[in-house]
Amino acid sequence: MQINPADISPEVHQAKMRFGIVGNAPALIAAVSRAIQVAPIDLSVLITGESGSGKEFFPQIIHSFSARKHSKYIAVNCGAIPEGTIDSELFGHEKGAFTGAVSSRKGYFEEADGGTIFLDEVAELPLTTQARLLRVLESGEFLKVGSSTVQKTNIRIVAATNVDMIKAVEEGRFREDLYYRLSTVLISIPPLRDRGNDIALLARKFASDFAEKYRTPAIQFDDSARRLMMQYRWPGNVRQLKNVVEQIALFEAGSQVASEDIEAYIPQNATMYAPAITSQGKTSVHSYDDEREILFNMIFRLQREIETLKALVTGTPASTPQLLDAHTNSSAIVKHTSYDNNILRVEEDDELHEVSEVESQEISSSMTLEDTERETIRRSLERNGGRRKATARELKISERTLYRKIKEYGLE
């Protein structure tokens, strides 16, 4: 679901244009609207959301729509400052307060007096610093490191975190009183996977920006690419999407980008996909482990049928290769097997795979699993004239998995 742009207030439009916010997802528009509403009121704000979801834009919106907009705005990444120097960075220090303090220094709270300070990754603050921050929020007072003189500051604090703050409080990692002081107003930023068509809008925007930046022909996304982008969970959110589109815009310049092209730029271990409703109304999640399971089961079934065929020809008992156990996610069975004119026919899922007796003798039961997998892929490639798309379809795995296996087994 998307909000009609005509139904968005002029203030929200202005904020989106000014800060380059793309999208019309209801949760996103609600977050922008909430930031604008709270901006004129001098309250502390806590912004929550996953890493890479765009939390950094909202303190800027709050500052620019507030009475403090002509004063300083300072953004501080609390997670990037070492614990030993964080107090000095935030509150300043006096000369000689510690080794290396050769002169007095103003901290961010003194520098931003009258303005807004944005504390990103606020959950990373040490407990001692949290106590100092609480005093600032309650009374506007602070002490420089190494000083006994109380100083005052008139500052608005906006904080952000991707941590579950309630859990952090329960575990003793964050002060409960500070949490309630910071979260006078809460703004939640939706993850990219929950923003629907915003994904395609952002991808198109990034593609256009990078084409201009690198002076290359713009890329276009076909329907399969858009479907994959909508389905993928984007654990890195907008930051990850931007990174992926940048690589594609550079290396596939001027191309019509399909789903397999995008898959090549998604990290191999990032196999989480958003839940999709199947025709039976059940929820399923795509994983390349499932494809590996299918390939292994096909290999084991082939070995089992070869042993059965050898037993029929030689009159010796057949040794039955064991299927993978439940811990390796294997439970498929062969629907129907028949023998006709020295041809072994294995029928499964309405597809007929034929292996001649000569071929079957070549695949020895003493071969390793890797050898059998390599041989299965090689023969499938031969049957399909080297066409990888058709081979992947026959083996019921993705082209990306097939490319990886071809490279791994030296079948180029």
Image: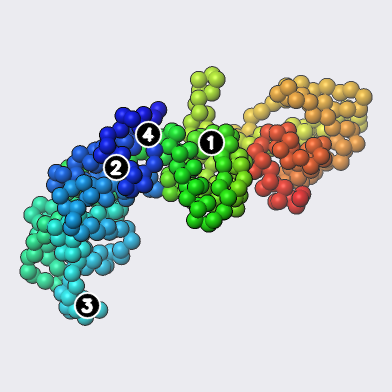
Tell whether label 3 touches label 4 (CB within 8 Å). Answer: no
Against 224, residue 128 (above or below) is: below
- Residue shown at the point (22%, 77%) measured from the top left: 101
In the displayed structure image, the side of residue 264 where residue 277 appears, left or right:
left
**Disc assigned to residue 14:** 2
Label 3 environment density (alpha carbons within 10 Å; few <14, some 14–19, many ≥20): some
Tell whether label 4 touches label 2 (CB within 8 Å). Answer: no
Kind of residue sitting beneath label 4: Ala
First of labels 3, 1 by sequence position:
3
Can the viewer see residue 273?
no
Q: CA distance from mark 4 to mark 1?
A: 17 Å
First of labels 3, 2 by sequence position:
2
First of labels 2, 4 by sequence position:
2
Label 1 environment density (alpha carbons within 10 Å; few <14, some 14–19, many ≥20): some
In front of the other: 125 or 201: 201
Q: Position of residue 129 (x, y in %)?
A: 20, 59
Quickly name the residue at label 1.
226
**Disc assigned to residue 308:** none
Quickly name the residue at label 4.
25
- Residue shown at the point (54%, 23%) measured from the top left: 278
First of labels 1, 2 by sequence position:
2
Q: Nearer the viewer, mark 3 or mark 1?
A: 1
Colour theme: rainbow
Tell whether label 1 touches label 3 (CB within 8 Å). Answer: no
Quickly name the residue at label 3.
101
Q: Position of residue 142 (x, y in %)?
A: 12, 62
Label 3 SS: loop
Tell whether label 1 touches label 4 (CB within 8 Å). Answer: no
Kind of residue sitting beneath label 3: Ala
First of labels 4, 1 by sequence position:
4
Label 2 environment density (alpha carbons within 10 Å; few <14, some 14–19, many ≥20): few
